[in-house]
Image (cartoon, grey):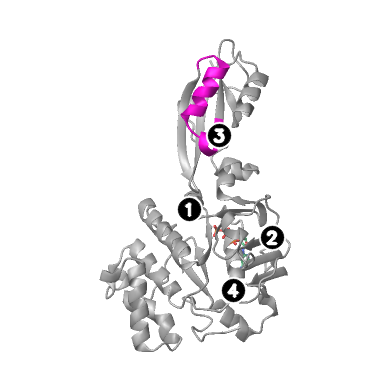
Amino acid sequence: MTVQSGLVATDPTAAILWDVSLPIERTAEAPQRAYRPAYQAHSPQRDLVALRNVTKIFPARGQAPEVVALKGVSLSVGAGEIYGIIGRSGAGKSTLIRLLNGLETPTTGRVEIARVELGGLTPGELRHQRRSIGMIFQHFNLLSSRTAFGNIALPLELAGTPAVETERRVGELLDLVGLADKRDAYPAELSGGQKQRVAIARALATNPRILLSDESTSSLDPETARSILALLAKINRELGVTIILITHQMAVIKQICHRVGLLEAGHLIEQAETYDFFADPQSDLARTLAGHDAGHALPADLLERLTSTPLPGGQKVLRLTIAGEAANVVALSQFNREIGVDVAILQGQVETIAGKPLGHFVISLSSDIPQTRLDETLGRLGIKSEVLGHVA
Ligand SMILES: Nc1ncnc2c1ncn2[C@@H]1O[C@H](COP(=O)(O)OP(=O)(O)OP(=O)(O)O)[C@@H](O)[C@H]1O
């Protein structure tokens, strides 16, 4: 293993290269749906990053009880993937990412980078390993006394890179993140999005193979967040950097992640390709987060009128999810034709996730149509449905 010299272990900017070009073998998969993404199918490094049955317990201290932050979590991330970990506050996301960069150690289980278990390393080796992973943060963590150039150059300087080479590399990175004209600006003179671009350039300065992102777009406005995510996607695509991000925002997962893992109270309750996660969520929490929970985003006046029992001569309200190429109003018109009664569209949206359309519609139709007939017709057309209630 080649190890580059770099930042001191306590430096929050630790974003340094660690050569992880080690032989990779296949091991048991973390629990997940049966699939193998195309971008992983031929990858020799399917387990570039792996957690194997990891439990993290923070022991009781004073009046504070013991906290089981992670319980039996297993997952693996392949080289070249963008893997998103989502969960509510306190679910264990930060603990998980801190385990990956060696800032925490598991109580039981193994954390591996390129099949090397972090727990088996000496402190010195662990320091070197931590330098192999770039990291970006919600609040950027830039040094206010250094310009954009100075911040990006820092890891190179600490690694003893010759000045001419540093100059060249920083110029290249400023171009990559679209900030060539801000080379001499101090953080105070930069917008939030520009600061995050500098932080990304700094994290990439020494060519890390893995980039960890800790809520890196959470403090940015939606448009700026989208542009930062687009930059991360470009870095993944063009430089092949594997990205693991934690977020509480579904929009982040939707925009750039290939796969997603859902944490709830320390348990990894669901893992799926991003499209499947939204098109066919399995857990209650995933359904809620994916907007499938009954009542979510329904107009307030409709919500107020919804009852759980059919009303004479009334209407049944259904939520429909139409996945794949059929995810448009054509599938809905076909359903309308086949069912042979008026169908009112109360709400509708077709979005593109991972390049594929996914349609969400809320419709109402006569409560007189037997549910078995609806189920049969919808099933035949490949449309998922959920009865939300009834209105007069
Ligand atoms: N050092 C610690 N000592 C004791 N308990 C901790 C420590 N760090 C985290 N916890 C607890 O572990 C649980 C998981 O916390 P964690 O920060 O990983 O969640 P999270 O999903 O990142 O939450 P958030 O989105 O709010 O940052 C919480 O109950 C938290 O209080």
User: Would you call the spot at circle 2 few (<14 residues within 10 Å), some (14-19), or many (20 or more)?
Assistant: many
Give the CA separation, mark 1 to mark 3. 21 Å
Question: Mark 4: which secondary structure?
Answer: loop
Q: Nearer the viewer, residue 270 or 4?
A: 4
Instruction: Write the start and end of the magenta stretch as one range.
Output: 320-342
For the residues marked 3 and 4, what is the alpha-carbon distance in whole angstroms?
42 Å
Residue 297 image position (x, y, % from top left): 48, 35
In the rendered image of this protein, does residue 205 appear above or below residue 314?
below
How far is mark 1 from mark 4, CA to CA?
A: 25 Å
Numbered mark located on residue 73 in the image = 2
Label 3 Cα neighbours within 10 Å, binned few <14 / some 14-19 / many ≥20: many
Image location (x, y in percent) of residue 133: 53, 73
Which secondary structure lies at badge 3?
A: strand
Look at 49% across and 31% down and name the residue there.
Answer: 298
Q: Is 269 in front, or is 67? A: 269
Whether pointer 4 and pointer 2 mark residues with C-beta atoms closer than 8 Å, the reply is: no
Q: On the image, numbered disc 3 is attached to which residue?
A: 321
The amino acid at mark 3 is Thr
Q: What x and y, as percent, mark residue 154? A: 40, 81
| Three-letter amino acid code at the position of disc 2 | Val
Mark 4 vs mark 2, CA separation in Å: 17 Å
Q: Is mark 2 within 8 Å of ligand 1?
A: no
Q: Type of residue at label 1? A: Val
State the residue position of label 1. Answer: 252
Q: Is residue 81 magenta?
A: no
Residue 145 seen by the camera: no
State which tag comes first along the sequence, 2 or 1.
Answer: 2
Q: Quadrant of the N terminus?
A: bottom right
Q: Which residue is mark 4?
A: 103
